[in-house]
Image (tube, rainbow, N blue to C red):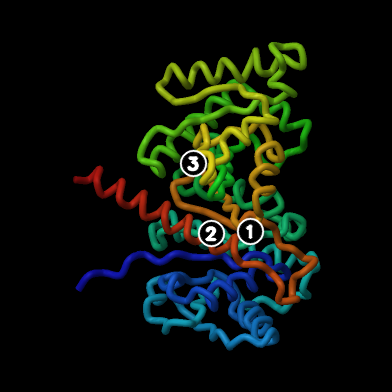
Amino acid sequence: MTPSPLPLVITMGDAAGIGPEIIARTFRDTPEAMRGIFVAGDVGTMRRATQLLVAAGQPVVPVAVIGAPSEVWQVPPRCIPVMQVERALTSVPWGQVSAQAGAFAGRCVLWAAQAALRKEVRAMVTAPLHKEALSAAGAPFDQFPGHTEMLQDCAARFLGRPVDEVPVRMMLANEELRTVLVSIHVSMRDALDAVTYDNVLQTLHISHAALSMVLGRSPRIAVAGLNPHAGEGGLFGREEVDTIAPAVAAARAAGLDVSGPWPPDTVFMRARNTAQRPGEFDVVVAMYHDQGLIPVKYLGVETGVNVTLGLPLVRTSPDHGTAFDIAGTGRADAASLGAAIRMAQGLSATINASQSSDVH
């Protein structure tokens, strides 16, 4: 008998946000695509989320409780398999910061990451966390600004390495544009300090390794400058001359297809891939969070996917937050979650195929 493939896990996210609702909506709307996928979360919270769909005149989506990831294949179609990974969560109000919800969401992420590291699941997709709730939860979650840093710490512990020896980067992607960030959740002032030769070069190597696997070839990497007009040869700042350009040169010397630094106000347009105009680049390396995320999100939050590069596991997430302002209303759009699931499935399949070919 052929063994069942490894399942994929979705973490529930903050119970007070839209995560449970968009998960329930995705299971309802695309049941065939959700076979072999389960939720690491709270059974009661997921049942509450299904009632939002019922209240909107939609059919009931039953919640099926499983005790292990492998049991997902025994769940009937058109059900939501949920694994209760912690003690039942007391119901929390929609749209309000809750330390209890933050702690539960954090524990779901850690459980799923450990399952992925142990190869019990093939990939993880994370519904949105609320950073304030995560901080309010206290230790250990208050030391992490978000998913990326938490997953990096978890992977480092699993591998028995210091965190700085497991470098990760955030990539945001949709069908038209990809961008990888040199720094993530830090202040603007700290982001400027993070534009170092080592950080830029490391970002280029991480981007190259990850996208080479996805594309099956060396990716064309564009590097955005930090200053207006990429510094104009040092007239508007020295970072391009002293830091970014040397890192680009070192990456090119190592065989990477890298160019720049390019003016940040035009490089994203050049990289945008449409039916009318193929992009000049496969990815843009941005110097800080908003520089890279604003262009991708402008093209459509509903289609964007966050991918963590550099981890020894596949992790994707929707390109939006907990949306407390509409939580509990039944109006949340699940398109980005669907895109994140498809991305996780594709990445895990690519990695498995690559590993199989290496063995043979």
Q: Nearer the viewer, mark 2 or mark 3?
A: 2
Nearer to us in this view, 19 or 117 = 19
Please give left or right for residue 346 compared with residue 279 in the image.
left
Nearer to us in this view, 62 or 174 = 174
The secondary structure type at the circle numbered 1 is helix
Q: Quadrant of the C terminus?
A: top left
Instruction: Indicate the position of residue 91 as horizontal and vertical percent values.
Output: 72, 79
Q: Which residue is identified by label 3?
A: 310
Q: Which amino acid does label 2 sit on?
A: Ala
Looking at the image, residue 97 lies above or below residue 62: above
Decide which of tag 1 and tag 2 comes sooner along the chain. Answer: 1
Instruction: Indicate the position of residue 303 as horizontal and vertical percent values.
Output: 59, 56
Decide which of tag 2 and tag 3 comes sooner along the chain. Answer: 3
Q: Which amino acid does label 3 sit on?
A: Gly
Decide which of tag 3 and tag 1 comes sooner along the chain. Answer: 1
* Label 3 crowd (10 A; few <14 / some 14-19 / many >=20): many
The secondary structure type at the circle numbered 3 is loop
Q: Which residue is painted at 50% across and 57% down in the image?
A: 113
Q: In which quarter of the image is residue 87?
A: bottom right
* Label 2 crowd (10 A; few <14 / some 14-19 / many >=20): many
Q: Which residue is painted at 63% across and 54% down in the image?
A: 319
**C-alpha span from label 2 to label 3:** 20 Å
**C-alpha span from label 3 to label 1:** 25 Å
| Disc 1 + disc 2, Cβ < 8 Å | yes
- Mark number for residue 339? 2
Q: What residue type is labelled 1?
A: Glu
Q: Which residue is identified by label 1?
A: 302
The secondary structure type at the circle numbered 2 is helix
Looking at the image, residue 262 lies above or below residue 119: above
- Mark number for residue 173? none
Instruction: Indicate the position of residue 34 as horizontal and vertical percent values.
Output: 46, 71
